[in-house]
Amino acid sequence: METRLILFGPPGVGKGTQAKLLAEHFGIPHFSTGDILRAAVAAGTELGKKARTIMDAGKLVPDDIMINLVREALASSRAAKGFILDGFPRTLEQAKALSVIFRDLKILRFHVVNFEVDDEEIIRRLDNRLICPKEGKIFNLEFDSLEKGGQCPSCGVPLVQREDDKPETVRERLRIYHATTKVVVDFYKQQGVVMTVDGTGTVDVVNREIRMML
Ligand code: AP5
Ligand code: MG
């Protein structure tokens, strides 16, 4: 059976971390809209030029750009046997557009995994997050026994902090989440497809909980 998951929740809740584990477990692709945008910024494409200042300020990239990007990803042959969508939808407009995309692609079954962690823990996690700019791997200074300025244990390139993980930008991302994104979960609750996960356990505990619920 195809697995189609939407990972939903505030910045830093662990969507990317769990998406990578679940994608490996189920053998399906992981589409992170944030990763796609960061790759475009790094490559200096038109999309990247448009997105850069918006992302660095912690704001949302316009809906039409995001909807087209996701439509293209989900219509690709890679997504035919299932997928994990991480970071989309985050407005009601995007959620409604995704329903149209699913209808067009004849997708009837999907789940929304709704992660919950309080804002204080999120600020701590993002303050301690490092990423590998080459492979997109996600680390944390608190439990990955790394140091600031350290190297990726798998490919050796220097790890970096994301531009939008500065404390004032994290606060703005959280503000936007509470003001604009959080309501999207109600749209899905009305469809009876939401599974809520307590994101405060360890990475392994959260992963086991999601797999059990599925
Ligand atoms: P995006 O990249 O999607 O960022 P986000 O939603 O803010 O989420 P993050 O990637 O920051 O966090 P995460 O939940 O993936 O957590 P992670 O696993 O890394 O978007 C970035 C920007 O792109 C947006 O601000 C916007 O500008 C734009 N954008 C993207 N999509 C858009 C859309 N649809 N519409 C408009 N604009 C869009 O974990 C965080 C840290 O916690 C790590 O250090 C990790 O090691 C650690 N951690 C993970 N799990 C645990 C655990 N269980 N316990 C302790 N620590 C943990
Ligand atoms: Mg992420």
Image (tube, rainbow, N blue to C red):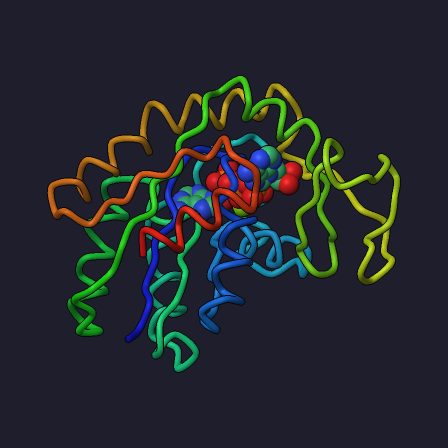
| 111, 177: nearer the viewer | 111
Q: Position of residue 107 (x, y in %)?
A: 20, 69
Residue 65 in view in this figure: no
Which quarter holds ligand 2? Answer: top right
Q: Position of residue 21 (x, y in %)?
A: 54, 58
Q: Where's the N terminus, which quadrant?
A: bottom left
Q: Is residue 140 left or right of residue 18?
A: right
Residue at (68%, 39%) from the top-left corner?
162
Q: In which quadrant of the rendered view does residue 8 lie?
A: top left
| 21, 161: nearer the viewer | 21
Q: Is residue 207 above or below residue 23?
A: above
Q: Is residue 140 left or right of residue 175?
A: right
Q: Where's the C terminus, which quadrant?
A: bottom left
The single residue placed furthest to the left in the displayed view is 190
| 20, 33: nearer the viewer | 20
Q: Position of residue 84 (x, y in %)?
A: 41, 60
Q: Is residue 19 above or below residue 171?
A: below
Q: In which quadrant of the rendered view does residue 109 lie?
A: bottom left
Q: Is residue 62 above or below residue 198?
A: below
Residue at (74%, 59%) from the top-left corner?
134
Circle count:
0
Residue at (46%, 35%) from the top-left corner?
199
Residue 138 in view in this figure: yes
Residue at (80%, 61%) from the top-left corner?
154
Q: Position of residue 178 (x, y in %)?
A: 36, 24
Q: Is residue 25 above or below residue 13?
A: below
